Every structure is written in C-alpha cells, then in structure tokens.
Image (cartoon, rainbow, N blue to C red):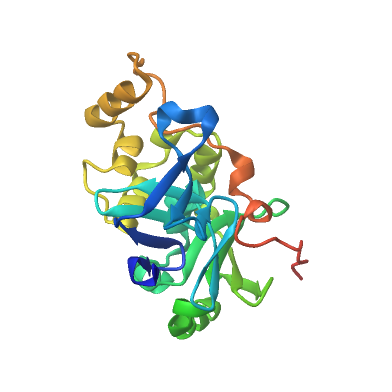
Amino acid sequence: MSINKNIHVYNARVILVDKFPHITEILYEDDLRYNKIKQLVFGRGRKTMTIGKHFEIGLERYYIDVIEKTDSGYKVATSRLTRTSCYLLPSLGISIKELSWKHNGSFINAYLHRDIEDIMCLVFRVSGIANSNSLAIEKLKARTNCIDYYQPDNTHEVLLFRMDRKYYQDYNMFIKSKYSKISDKYKARIVDFHDAHKTSSIYGILYKTELARQQLEEKIGVPIPNDIEYGEVLDLEKEYIDNCNVIRYHNKVIL
C-alpha cells in the first residue's frame, strides 16, 4: 500500500497526514486519558511515524516532535512552536512573509541563546521543499540585525539576530511568564505580527480576556483567581537553541 499521496509536507515545521483506512494510533500508556499520540502505524506496520524519531518522505528525513489529531487526519510537527517564536520573534521587525513561515515555508522555530541574552536564533530548513526559499533566507542574512549564521548540518541553517534593546523590559516580562505585563505597544506588535484576532489564544493571554479565562478554567477544571497569568509558565530550557530537537547546536563562538 502506498501512503505517499496521503502525507503532505505543508512547510518545514508541519506535515499533514490525511485520514484514510489502515492507520492505527498508538497512545502513551502512562497518559491515556489525554489521548496523546506516540505513534502512527500505517498499513500492516511496515511504516510508522513515531515521536522522537525521523520519518522519510521521498528523499528527505523529518524529525517527529508532535502528533495531533484533526478533523481531516493528523497534524505532525517537526518541532513544537517555541514561546520565543510566539512572543519575542516580532521584536526583530521581520514579517511572517519575510520569514517564509507559512505554506511551503522554510522557517522552523526561534530560540534563545543560552550564553548571550540578547541573541535570538532562527532555525530554517534548507533542503527539500525549503530549497525554493533560499533567496528569502539570503535577504534575512543581509539585514543589519543579523550578526551571524551557520549550517549545523546539510539540512538546516541557523541565523543569529541581535534583539532590539528597547524591548528589554518586555523581554524580562516574557522570561518571568508575565505575559499580561508586556507593554501595550509591544502587545500590539505581537498581535499585528500574528494577525491575531480577539478570540485567539495569544490575544487572550496577552490581554487576559474573559474568553481566555473561561477556556483555562475548563481545561484545569477549577476557578482561577484574577491575579494569575492565563499563559503557561515558561519552560526556559525548551527555549534554548541547544535543546532544538531538529538539530544539535555546536556552541558556535560569535566573534
């Protein structure tokens, strides 16, 4: 049975799997109540898509980090979107279009540098579907706030950007998981960057909307006080480039 026609590389970070017969979900045994998918088994099991392993599509290999069920099938992520991509990336003054984030895009994720506080590391895929975006990546390299770049392997490229110091207080609020305390000016920048509507998750977290409060209460099953943040507490370790699943950072020295 050929499954290639049922699997589509949407962009460098997202793979879409159509709903079709002879596909089996394997859940995490210690977390069955949340229906978290560990593996997809195709046909008689000769081909599987497993979290923490690579999956071949044509001549390309993709790391599998997240598998989520959707109405049409499954949404598979090669890398879970970082909080840095959601909240800090807009500070660089680069649009989503310039990043090549959407359909057929090469952008994967943004990370922090463990040793240098004001450096943001943007990871791109430079093979397979992302080859067509090489010009966009070259334009990003030419930006004045791009201070360095390197290829950790033949599949990925990392661009290093220096963050604007005028957002330093907003950066501190982000690090402390105080999303609603981010300045109104920078909140507006985040919303504009993501084209987020008032019912979106990121808008609700930034502005602590009533809808976001209700959704959080439904998720955790208890009333929440007004003085807490509606976004998850930041797991800083997951935001560092050396913990990027699709590559392994080699502690490049920035001159």
Residue 96 can be seen, yes or no: yes
Instruction: Give left or right: position of 249 versus 120.
Output: right
Where the C terminus falls, by quadrant?
bottom right
| Residue 225: percent from left, percent from top | 36, 15
Where the N terminus falls, by quadrant?
bottom left
Instruction: Please tell me which residue lies in front, 255 or 200.
Output: 200
Residue at coordinates 23% horizontally, 27% vertically from top-left? 210
| Residue 173: percent from left, percent from top | 50, 38
Q: Looking at the rendering, which quadrant does residue 209 occupy?
A: top left
Instruction: Please tell me which residue lies in front, 73 or 207.
Output: 73
Instruction: Give left or right: position of 138 versus 117.
Output: left
Instruction: Please tell me which residue lies in front, 245 or 250.
Output: 245
Residue at coordinates 41% horizontally, 61% vertically from top-left? 14
How many marks the image carries: the answer is 0
| Residue 87: percent from left, percent from top | 44, 49
| Residue 56: percent from left, percent from top | 53, 69
Image vertical order of residue 103 relative to residue 242, above or below:
below
